[in-house]
Every structure is written in C-alpha cells, then in structure tokens.
Image (tube, helix red, strand yellow):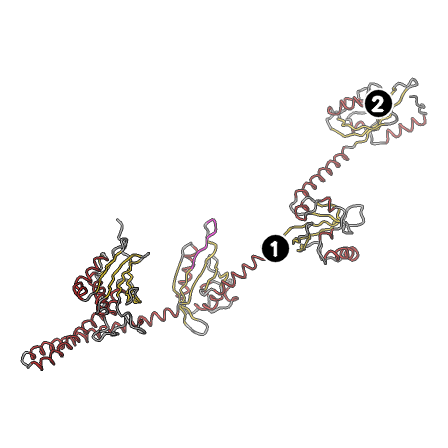
Amino acid sequence: MSREPISPAESDLLLSFARATDDLVTVVDAKGRFIYVNEASEKLLGLTPAECVGRSAFEFIHPEDRARTYAGFEVWAGGDTNGPFCFENRQVSVSGEVREMRWSITRKEDESGELEYLVSIASDQTEIRSAQRALAESRTELMAILGGALDPIITIESNGTIRSANASCETIFGYPPGELVGRNVRLLMPEPYRSEHDGHLAHYLETGETAVLGRRREFPVVRKDGKQITIELSVSRVDLPGQGEPVFVGSFRDITERDRAMRALAASERKFRAIFDQEYQFVGLMTPGGKVLELNRAAFEAIGVECDEAIGKPFWEMPCWADHPETQDRILEAIGEAGAGKFVRLETRGSLPGGSQRVIDLSIKPFRNEEGEVTLLLPEGRDITEIRQSQEREAAMLRGLAEIGESASILAHEIKNPITAVNLALRAVAKELGEDDQVVLRDLVERMQKLEKLMRRTMSLARPLDLDPTPSSVLELLRGATALLVPQLEQSGVDLEISVARNCPDVLVDRLRFEEVLTNLVNNAFEAMQGGGELRLEAYAEANSVVVCVDDSGEGLPTGHEDELFKAYFTTKAKGSGLGLAISRKIVEAHGGTIEARSSPLGGARFEIRLPRHQEEED
C-alpha cells in the first residue's frame, strides 16, 4: 500500500507538535529500533531522545507484556492492518518505574509498499488506570457491603422510582432486587402512606420541608406476600455530580420482633408492677451502698414516705427512723453486711408521721451478678406491730394464768387436807352409830372422797407437767393400757381388738403419762358400751407422725357439744368430773401431739391421737 509523501511543511508541523506535547512520540524502524523520540522520553523512559535513538523499543516494555507486544508488532510490520491502530501495554523506565501507556500507531511504507517505519504517539494512562481500578475496587467493596448488609437498603430517584436494592430486600420484603428496580417505592407501603408518598416527595423538592430526612422513625411495610411488618426507617439525601435531581437512600430495619418483644416486656412490667405493688409485705431494691432504687406501695405505707422522698435517698435516712438513731445505726450496719454478701435479718422500730409506733421485721438479701459481685440489695419487710402486741398480751395473759394455776394448786392443797381429816373422822364416827345412820355417813364419805379426787385432778391439771420421755413400743403401750380392764370387758360382752401396723415406729413418750391417757379413753369407751359392743385400738404410721385411734360402738359423741369435749369440768356423765379429757389433751400436747374426737366407723366415738415419729440418732 503506497502513501503520499509528507511535505516539508507537514513535517515541520509534526515536529512542532512532537516537541510541544507531553505524550511520548516515537518513530521505529522495521526492527523496532528508535529512529526518533521526542523530549517526553526523559520523563517516561528515563533517557534523553539522543540516548534512545538506535535502541530497541522492546527494551522498555514490561516483561509480562513483551510477548503480546511482539505479536502486535509483527502484525503492524506485516501490513495486515488498515489505518492507525491502538494498543496498550506497560513501559518500564531505566529506573524501574512502571507506566501504563496507550499507543496510537501509524504505518509508513516506502514506494514498494514495504514497511519503512512506524510512527507512534503514546499517552500516559497510569493515573487514569489507577483511578479506574480504585473506582472499580470501591464499587466492588460498596456492592459487597450492600450485598452483605442484613438490613435492606434501597436508593430512589426524586420521583420515587427505585434505582437499586440490595439482596436483603428479598429476605425481609420478599422481593428480589430485580423486581424492585424501576418500580415506585410506594409498592412497599400500606394505605394511606402509599397514596400520600409521591405528594410528600414533591412537597419536599419544592419547599425543602421534610419530617423524614436525618432521623429514624418506625414505619409499616407490606411484604410481597401481603403480610405487614414494622420497620425502622432512616433516609438520607445524596446529590450526585452532574445530576440536577437528588437521590435518596433508605435503610430499613425489621423491628417486628423487637416491637412485639417490647410490647410483651411492657405488659410484663405492668403485671410485675401490679404484683409488686399488691404484695402484702414491703419489697424494694437498693444499691450495695444502701441508696433506694425502687419500693412497692406497701413499703411506702410501711415507712411513711412518698416516692420522691425515698428514691435515690439512703435507706436508713427514711423519715420513719428519724427519731430512732439506734435503729438507723442497726440498719446502716446491716446494709454494710449485706453489701459484703451476707443475708441479714433484724427487727426495727419506727414512727409514722401521725406518731404511731410500728415494728417491722426487716431482711436484706444481696443479689450477685455472674461474676459473684453484689450489684443490688433486696430489702423485704413486714409490719409485725400487731403480732408483737398480741404476743405481749399473750405473755401477760400466760403470766396471769400461771398465777391463777399456782393459786388454784395452793387452794386445792389447802382444801385437800381438811377433807381428808373429815373423811377419817366420819369413818370413825360411823362405827359408833346404828345401821340407818351409817348409811347416811357412808354417803357423806363417798361425797368427800369424790371431792378429794376432784381436788387431786384439779391440781394435776393446773400443775406443769414434768415429763420423762423414753422410746416406747406402741403395741406395748396399748396392751398396758387395757391389761387391767380385760376381765371387765369380757364380763360385759365387749370385744377388744388391738391392731398395730408392721411399719409403725416407736414413739418418744412418758410411758406412765401416756398410758394414763389411753386408760382414760378406754374407760370412757367401756362406760359408753354397758350392754356390750366393740372396742378397737389401732396404730399406724404417716409421713411424719404416728396415729393412735380408740374406736367404740357406743352411744357416740354428745350432739352439739363436740367443741366442748376437751374443756375442763365439761361432762355428760352423771358421776363424771369433766377433767379426764382435759388432762388427756394436756398430756398429749405436752408430747408435741394432737388429740381429736369424731364419729367412729363402728358407730360410736373415735379419739385420734397424733404423735411425732421418734427419729433414732445415727452413730
């Protein structure tokens, strides 16, 4: 292919251009040697033009690009291309600096069509390519961040059209990103927001007024499946260079579960507060140093303060203890012990605003975190003023009863001796009288004996019991209580049955005293069955007690008097003293047991005694 020769004027023009441009201008021969290089070679190749002439252009090609450049040169030299062509490679200066170059190459042929030389103009693309790579890396990084974000991120144009959406939109909203791009963002909104959205955007673009940008707000969103969820939305404005309209970036966070949990927590707190405030005992929270954090309503009432008077104040400085410095000192000491990890309980005395004196049973419990550090103190208390007052009244009453019992015992003793003397005198006089007079005196003697017996039993009831308990077999106790009565029972037609369960343990009792109880119950049953009947004594074990029952088939319990059976001097018998059951109950209760009366399966009365099980000491 022949070309028109360059005129001198054109040659001068080209040389002027080559000297003035910052691009590298070279001319190489058919073997790739420099014929001409402009001054840009000093900057790009590290050599002057004169130093470059005659050297191979391939010396300055990066080793990794050299084979590709050789292949291109063969194509250019062979004339298989038409017109100028472009090529990119990396050039390495003599100092080792690498630059990325873009070449525009033109082939010059001689008259025979053979390659005469190649004219090349190369522009330095190093900074441009570096910027492009940085931009590509930044874009890749940004896309990775957006793609990896768990929260949906959407960008929209000023008319509401979605420009981009990350992968999390499908997870949260159910829409793949491709289904969202190009559609209006209002498709994610329920009414009335859907109809109002475009108007809000237009209003903002016109006036600059918005209640959305730069803040977080909760917002309902409609998923692809129609389900509505609650999200937390934040929107920011981005102004892109060269674009007249802004772009808006929205970040969504699904807070449906959080919202549900918060509502559940609020409901739980309301329930807790209701229970907390309705608690009969007063309860609170304190810092380890004793500052009040929370108190329930009962506490405010118990210590006579309002909420603002207590919260944040030292517990020991509550107004109810202001006039009781000794109580304040004890509470302060107790808080110190609880703060060190010890459970503390104490009884405090204070005064309410009206002057009423109160007694509070107070405990302070330390609460530890996972590291074992005391982080909270839990004060708990109850107003025991009435209990203490009742105990004081009961103590006074017991002292009075003790004095009455002591007086009764002394009186009974003083009466007993004259009765005994009168009884002996009557017997002596009866020997000197006739038969008719002796009948009268014998009746008097019997009455005096009955009175003497009554006095002895009264003294027994009034006198404190001095027990000598020993482990005893229940079967032996039952047999001992009935041994002397067996002949009378058989003679009267009463069938006696004694039944003790195999697993029935021993009981710890004063044997003589307890046999007295059993004998009294058996006698009562015998007297209730003068025409014959059944008498059954049985014993068995329960969880923590031994049960002893005395059943008869007699007349049963007196109707309407069940609550009076164990009262002193109450009796339905013509010759009874009314002390037998009262003494029996006193003996049973002194052993830590109970005795009750009820109807028997045999048709008469049942007396049921419960005693604590005897626990043998282990070696």
Answer whether labels 1 and 2 touch (C-beta < 8 Å).
no
Residue 565 located left or right of residue 482? right
- Residue type at tag 2: Trp
Of label 1 and label 2, which has the lower sequence position? 2
On the image, the x and y values in percent for residue 446 come to 14, 76
Q: Amino acid at mark 1?
A: Asp
Q: Secondary structure at mark 1?
A: helix
Between 414 and 14, the one lying in front of the other is 414
Magenta span dominant secondary structure: strand
| Left or right position of 390 against 478 | right
Q: Height in image: 412 above or below 497?
A: below
Instruction: From the top left corner, tell me how far across and down residue 263 is, in percent.
Output: 59, 57
- In x, y percent, where is residue 171? 66, 46
Q: Quadrant of residue 92?
A: top right
In which quarter of the view is residue 24 placed?
A: top right
Q: Which residues are magenta?
A: 364-371
Horizontally, is 168 left or right of 538 in the view? right
Secondary structure of the residue carrying tag 2 is: helix
Report the disc number at residue 259. 1
User: What mark, if any, has residue 76 been given in the picture?
Assistant: 2
